[in-house]
Image: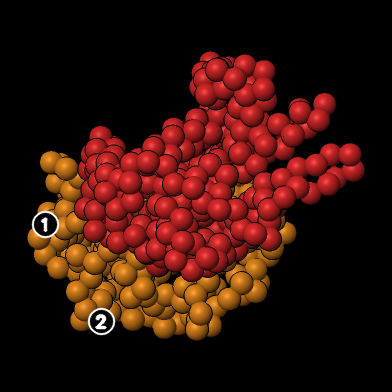
Chain colours: A red, B orange
Amino acid sequence: MQLYMSQLLNGIGLGMIYFLVAVGLTLVFGVMRFVNFAHGAFYLLGAYGTFTVMQVTGSFVLAVAAAVAAVALLALVMERAVLARIYALAPTYHILATFGVTLILEEAVKLLWSPAPQRVATPEMLRGLTQMGPFAYPTYRLTIIAVAALCALGLWYLLERTRYGALVRGGAESREVVSLLGIDVRRLFTVNFVLGAALAAFAGALVSPIRGADPGMGTEALAVAFVVCVVGGLGSFSGALAGALAVGILQSLATSLWGAGAGLVAYIAMALVLLVRPEGLMPRASRGAA
Amino acid sequence: MLSVDGIDAGYGKSQILYGASLKVEQGEAVGLLGRNGAGKTTTLRAIMGLLPISAGAITCHGRRLDGLPTHLVARQGLAMVPEYRGVLAQLTVEENLQIAVRRGTAFGLTDAYALFPRLRERKANSGATLSGGEQQMLAIARCLLAGPRLIILDEPTQGLAPVIVDEMVEAIQGIRRSQQATSLLLVEQNLDVCLALADRHYILEEGHVVHAASTADLAAAPRIQQRYLGVEDGAARAQA
């Protein structure tokens, strides 16, 4: 029982990290119908940024903040310099260009740091276990769940309760209508892209004390994020959350039942969802009669 | 204020507009008439920068509009309600309005609700649940929130029940009375609506203006109506 409880919490934590990565992918796809294969690289750089700033300053909070800010800046430059030139082209070019960016960034990581994994120390305050009745669970992992849940709540508020959120949802439905209202849809997209990148970097930063940082982690996270988006329904916020939690918990439970196949479970889940509900578990609300 | 001079435009290889020209002065209401496919909607889309023009010029208060992206055209004070109305189904009625609110304009959310009280009743409903008339109300109220100098309406009464058409005409007349400096450019298939709302009319055929007339002249010219608009009961209307 203890084991399953612990695996369940692990799954929720993992799921929340997946959510932070996947939601950015969904945000960007929603408004621009743009699939960003470089999204995993933001997660990767979030972890490495945290590693380095932590080594230099010793402060985890500072390291996370600096890593997220640096990745946001990089995303801004990338969006303006690379993506702005290819939006009008076919999706194949989007994939090629963003995949190219990923390769460059991954190789840069290997050159700047090393191909070997790096360890990131858990912040001192959050080491050890938290006792919950008869059950003990690592404090840092609990913190991740809480912080990511706060993040999800904040994002929900931003998307569902603010003018910016209404613009994002409206822009996803019709760019033409939103631009007729005097809104610069391009800028809206830049903001979305940078926000999504920052969230992915934040996820990478949060997860680094648990799994360390290694050059392959971005691609790995991207693959899972795609699975999450397909399971939840691409372009949907609640779908990303539900899909991420489902994949995280499944993977985590599978680890204790069938260690060798844990990695496979997510893909099996995706295949099943595609067979049974190809639109995803919680697709974006239907367009209705407009 | 708005001047369209000899523009060519089209979609891909099919050219629709061949040297179309028109003018709208400040405070004036101008109707744009013509058969299906004459280029009315294409003209409006070109003005709003939704479609590039390949010849000619579009200026507003002496400033070139052609070549500007749509949102900057809108910020020059042009607000268009497209033919499909553009109510966002993913948003509530209130959100549809909120995204159009601009600081420093005299017309706010309360004014929008005062203009169309029906919208206040439905403010929490999703845009997808609105009737055709309600959609048109929302679209018109939304375009006023930007405080436009020129309102462009593309077929505002299309597909509406006759009672609702009358209501819409009255509402637009009300807007014209309360915002006398605001100009109106109107595309309509319904000649009566166009005559009721506009001071002056252009008739488009095959992508250019073939006739320009005041409301009184056009109402009294059944042959023009018949020739360019295919209005069968033009004579009857002229006598009425």
Toward the viewer: B88 or B133?
B88
Location of mark 2 (residue): B61
Quadrant placement of the C terminus of chain B: bottom left
Q: Residue at x 46, y 61 (%)?
A: A55
Q: Residue at x 46, y 76 (%)?
A: B147
Asked whether the residues under the numbered discs 2 and 1 touch, taking CB atoms below 8 Å apart as contact, a structural biologist would say: no
The chain ID associated with circle 2 is B
Q: Residues within 10 Å of mark 2 (few under 14, many from 20)?
A: few
* Quadrant housing residue A176: bottom left
The chain ID associated with circle 1 is B
Please tell me which of labels 2 and 1 falls first in the chain.
1
What is the x, y in percent for residue B130?
61, 48
> Is residue A214 shown to the viewer in this render?
yes
In this figure, what is the number of numbered marks?
2
Q: Residue at x 51, y 51 (%)?
A: A120
Residue type of the residue flagged with mark 2: His
Q: Which mark is residue A73?
A: none
Q: Residues within 10 Å of mark 1 (few under 14, many from 20)?
A: some
What is the x, y in percent for residue B59?
21, 74
> Are discs 2 and 1 both within one chain?
yes
Residue type of the residue flagged with mark 1: Ser
Location of mark 1 (residue): B54
What is the x, y in percent for residue A237?
57, 45
Quadrant placement of the N terminus of chain B: bottom left
Q: Secondary structure at mark 1?
A: strand
Q: Is residue B75 above or below residue A218?
A: below
> Is residue B230 shown to the viewer in this render?
no
What is the x, y in percent for residue A154?
63, 58
